[in-house]
Image (cartoon, rainbow, N blue to C red):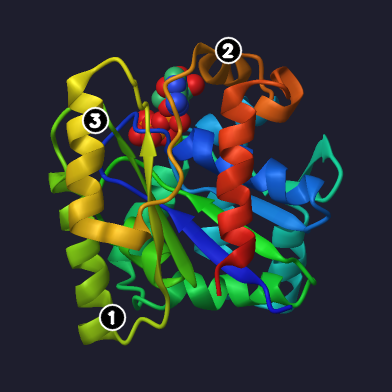
Amino acid sequence: MATKIITVANQKGGVGKTTTVINLCHGLSLQGKKVLALDFDPQGNLASALGIKQEMGIYYLLTMGQNNKEERQFIHQTVRTTGRKNLWTIPGNQDTRGAQIDMSTRERPVSYIRQVLDIFMKNRLDYIFIDTSPSLGGLQERALWAADLVIVPTAMEYLSNQGVIKLTEILRVLHEKYRWNGKLLGILPTFYDDTTRQSRDSLKHLREAFGDLVLPIIHRATVLREAAAEGQSIYEHDPDSRAAEEHLRVVKAVLRAK
Ligand SMILES: Nc1ncnc2c1ncn2[C@@H]1O[C@H](COP(=O)(O)OP(=O)(O)OP(=O)(O)O)[C@@H](O)[C@H]1O
Ligand SMILES: [Mg+2]
C-alpha cells in the first residue's frame, strides 16, 4: 500500500486535533499499520501527549528537507520512537514558527511539504499524520496540500460550523486553483454532550451540511483529557472506555477510506 498522508486541521483552537491525531495514530499502529505522526504546531503538544519530549525535529524537516543526501540522512535521525510498536514521531517545538517564517520568506511552492514528505514515503510507512496549529497560514495550506486525506475535528459545544465551512472552502480552492489531488475524509464531531441541546443542534446542522462526510462522533470525556495529561493514548489510559471505543470506530473509517 502506498503511504497515505492525513492532515488533521481546524483553525479553531481546542477542538480535539491533537487528541484525534494521537488516538488515530496509536489505533492504526495497534492494527499493525506503520505510522509516523508529525507535529506542525509550534505549541509542541503532540510530543507531550505521547509522553516524550519536545524537540526541533519539524524545524529541521521543514527547512532542510529538500537538501542534499547528508541532510536527508540527518532528518531521518530526527524521527523518534514512541515506545509503541509501529508508531514513530517527529516532535516539534516553538522553533516550528521559525520554519514557518523561513518557508514564506523563501516563497516555497504550495507543493513544498508534499515534496519533503516524499522522502519518507520510501520508508514503507502506511500512514503519515500531520497535526496542525489553530491558524490558517502558509504552513497549514501546504500541510493540507500535502494530504491525501483531510480530517476536520469540530467541537459540538456551540452552534458554529463557520470554521468547518471556511476550511472546506480552502480545500476547494486548493483543488481548483492549485490542483490538489487529495480529498476530505470527513468532519469529526468532538466534545459531543447528549445532555445539551447545542450538541444535538450542532450535529444536526453538520449532518445537513455534510451528510456522509460526518464521521462517528466523539463524546466529551474527562478520560481523554487525563490521558493527554499523562502522555498516554486512550487505549493505554482506559481501553474499556466509551472514548476508546469511539476512537476505534474512527480508526475503522480511516482504514476504509480510499
Ligand atoms: N472529547 C473530549 N472530551 C474532553 N476533553 C477533550 C476531548 N478532546 C480533547 N480534549 C481535551 O481538550 C483539550 C484540547 O484538545 P486538543 O489539544 O486535542 O485540541 P486541539 O484542537 O489540538 O487544540 P489546539 O488548537 O490548541 O492545538 C486537551 O486538554 C484535550 O485533552
Ligand atoms: Mg493541538
- Mark 1 or mark 3, earlier in chain: 1
Q: Is residue 125 above or below residue 252?
A: below
Ligand 1 within 8 angstroms of badge 2 C-beta: yes
Q: Is residue 187 above or below residue 196?
A: below
Q: Is residue 184 left or right of residue 64?
A: left
Q: Residues within 10 Å of mark 1 (few under 14, many from 20)?
A: some
Q: Is residue 59 above or below residue 127?
A: above
Q: Visible in this render: residue 233?
A: no
Q: Quadrant of the C terminus?
A: bottom right
Mark 3 residue type: Arg
The disc label shown at residue 175, or none: 1
The disc label shown at residue 226, or none: 2
The disc label shown at residue 68, or none: none
Q: Secondary structure at mark 2?
A: helix
- Mark 2 or mark 1, earlier in chain: 1
Which residue appears at 63% of the width and 33% of the height?
A: 245
The reply to whether dot 1 and dot 3 touch (C-beta < 8 Å) is: no
Mark 2 residue type: Glu
Which residue is at the front of the view, 146 or 201? Answer: 201
Q: CA distance from mark 2 to mark 1?
A: 38 Å
Q: CA distance from mark 2 to mark 3?
A: 25 Å
In this figure, which residue is indicated by the disc labeled 3? 200
Mark 1 residue type: His
Foreground mark, 1 or 3, reads 3
